[in-house]
Image (cartoon, grey):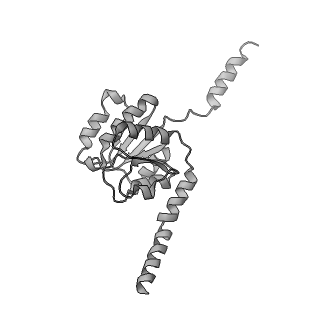
């Protein structure tokens, strides 16, 4: 009789899939003023007021590392920010697989390899609209921010976290532009043009 319900609840608890992990933002870059990790931390703090279970992982070394790690360890962030040393490409790829969004606060970029790698992993990018970023990131692969305002950056993070991006399409677009084959073809075209 009466104890059947208890058994069912136990089974349910065992067989139900784990709850999805808290949403994770990953940032890969040197911890220095050019990459402006402070802008990202300020934006993250604001985004967390809307999404309290949000987490941020900053991966990189640099002159500001100790200061950023101390700031990330402050009670305001209640252990939701992790600062990790520069990792191998394989380890970065693993982190990106767990990430919901890739973000950087950069002031300067020539070509953002980390952003391209994120998109190749199907992860949308949130960054300031600087340098080559508009050529790399569009509405189907992330959100570019027009001001260096933490509130605008937080809004972009929340927008990207809500999803709606096609990971497969993002990855194939990056492969079509930057795979060894694609780059090789373009170099071959340039050489044959120069050689006449």
Q: Is residue 17 left or right of residue 96?
A: right
Residue 7 visible in the current orientation: yes
Which residue is more in the foreground, 84 or 190?
190
Residue visible at 41% across and 37% down in the picture: 154
Q: Using the rendered view, name the quadrant where residue 18 is placed.
A: top right
Q: Where is residue 162 drawn, in percent x and y?
A: 52, 39
Which residue is more in the foreground, 172 or 96?
172
**Which quadrant of the figure contains the C terminus?**
bottom left
Query: Furthest-top residue in view?
Result: 2
Residue 52 visible in the current orientation: no
Residue 109 position (above or below residue 105): below
Residue 194 position (above or below residue 147): below
Which residue is more in the foreground, 127 or 117?
127
Query: Furthest-right residue in view?
Result: 1
Query: Furthest-bottom residue in view?
Result: 196
Residue 26 position (above or below residue 113): above
Residue 192 position (above or below residue 94): below
Which residue is more in the foreground, 186 or 53?
186
Q: Using the rendered view, name the quadrant where residue 66 is placed.
A: top left
**Which quadrant of the figure contains the N terminus?**
top right
Q: Where is residue 19 drawn, in percent x and y?
A: 56, 32
């Amino acid at each position: 009789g009466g104890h059947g319900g208890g058994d069912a609840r136990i089974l349910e608890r065992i067989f139900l899939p784990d709850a999805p992990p808290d949403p994770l933002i990953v940032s890969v870059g040197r911890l220095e003023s050019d990459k402006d990790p402070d802008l990202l931390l300020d934006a993250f703090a604001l985004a967390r007021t809307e999404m309290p279970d949000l987490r941020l992982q900053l991966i990189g070394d640099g002159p500001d590392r100790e200061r950023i790690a101390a700031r990330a360890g402050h009670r305001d962030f209640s252990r939701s920010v992790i600062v990790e040393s520069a990792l191998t490409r394989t380890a970065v790829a693993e982190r990106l697989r767990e990430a919901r969004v890739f973000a950087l606060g950069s002031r300067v970029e020539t070509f953002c390899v980390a952003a391209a790698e994120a998109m190749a992993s199907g992860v949308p990018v949130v960054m300031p609209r600087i340098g080559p970023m508009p050529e790399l990131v569009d509405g189907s692969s992330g959100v570019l921010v027009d001001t260096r305002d933490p509130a605008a950056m937080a809004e972009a993070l929340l927008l990207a976290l809500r999803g709606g991006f096609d990971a497969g399409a993002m990855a194939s677009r990056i492969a079509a532009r930057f795979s060894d084959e694609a780059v090789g073809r373009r170099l071959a075209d340039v050489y044959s043009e120069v050689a006449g």
